[in-house]
Image: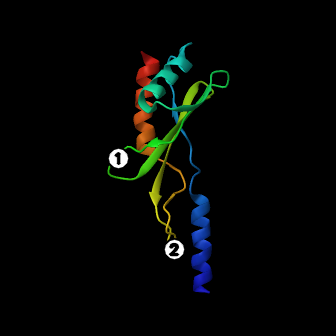
């Protein structure tokens, strides 16, 4: 009976975890008319490789590039899109590692990196507010 109670409490606590939300960059004056170009220039300058450039839908996505820490085998990619009167950004990171019985390394599942999103959000605010 005790194990059933523990199992139920674990399931309920997992359900209570809030869903991931991309970082929204809101500007008090709203987005400038050339906000897509400013975002594109910032992302190209930082990450160089864009695989999605859709001005009509206001969507930018980088290719996987080297991660922020040169001592760790990782990659990151950025996705930007317009969400209402804001720009939303997602920075995903994945790590290279070995599975328990695998002899070939593989990438972990991508996961959001909140610290990198906040750094990018600050850079976006500066670029869009200038």
* Mark 2 residue element: loop
| Residue that badge 1 annotates | 69
Residue ranking furthest to the top? 33
Q: Is residue 30 visible?
A: no
The residue nearer to you, when weighing 31 against 61, is 61
Which residue is depicted at the point 35% across and 47% down?
69
Q: Are marks 2 and 1 in contact (CB under 8 Å)?
A: no
Q: Which residue is mark 2?
A: 101
Badge 1: residue crowd in 10 Å (few <14, some 14–19, many ≥20):
few
**Residue at image location 61% in from the left, 66% down from the top:** 12
- Residue placed farthest to the right in the image? 56
> Helix, strand, or loop for circle 1?
loop
User: Of marks 2 and 1, which one's residue comes earlier in the chain?
Assistant: 1
Say which of marks 2 and 1 sits in front.
2
Q: Residue at x 57, y 77 (%)?
A: 6
Residue furthest front as drawn: 103
Q: Position of residue 96 (x, y in %)?
A: 46, 56
The figure's colour scheme reads rainbow
Residue 49, visible in the rendered structure: yes
Alpha-carbon span between mark 2 and mark 1: 27 Å
From this view, report whether residue 107 is shown above or below residue 64: below
Residue appearing at x 51%, y 42% in the figure:
64
Residue 89's disc is none
Count of picture labels: 2
> Where residue 129 sits: x, y (%)?
44, 18
Q: Quadrant of residue 83?
A: top right
């Amino acid at each position: 009976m005790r194990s059933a109670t523990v199992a139920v409490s674990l399931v309920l606590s997992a359900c209570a975890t809030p869903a991931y939300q991309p970082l929204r960059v809101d500007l008090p004056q709203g987005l400038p008319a050339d906000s897509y170009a400013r975002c594109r220039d910032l992302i190209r300058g930082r990450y160089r490789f864009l695989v999605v450039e859709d001005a009509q839908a206001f969507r930018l996505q980088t290719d996987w590039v080297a991660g922020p820490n040169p001592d760790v085998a990782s990659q990151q990619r950025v996705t930007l899109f317009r969400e209402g009167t804001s720009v939303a950004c997602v920075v995903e990171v994945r790590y290279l590692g070995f599975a328990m019985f695998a002899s070939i390394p593989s990438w972990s599942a991508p996961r959001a990196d909140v610290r990198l999103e906040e750094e990018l959000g600050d850079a976006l605010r500066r670029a869009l507010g200038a």
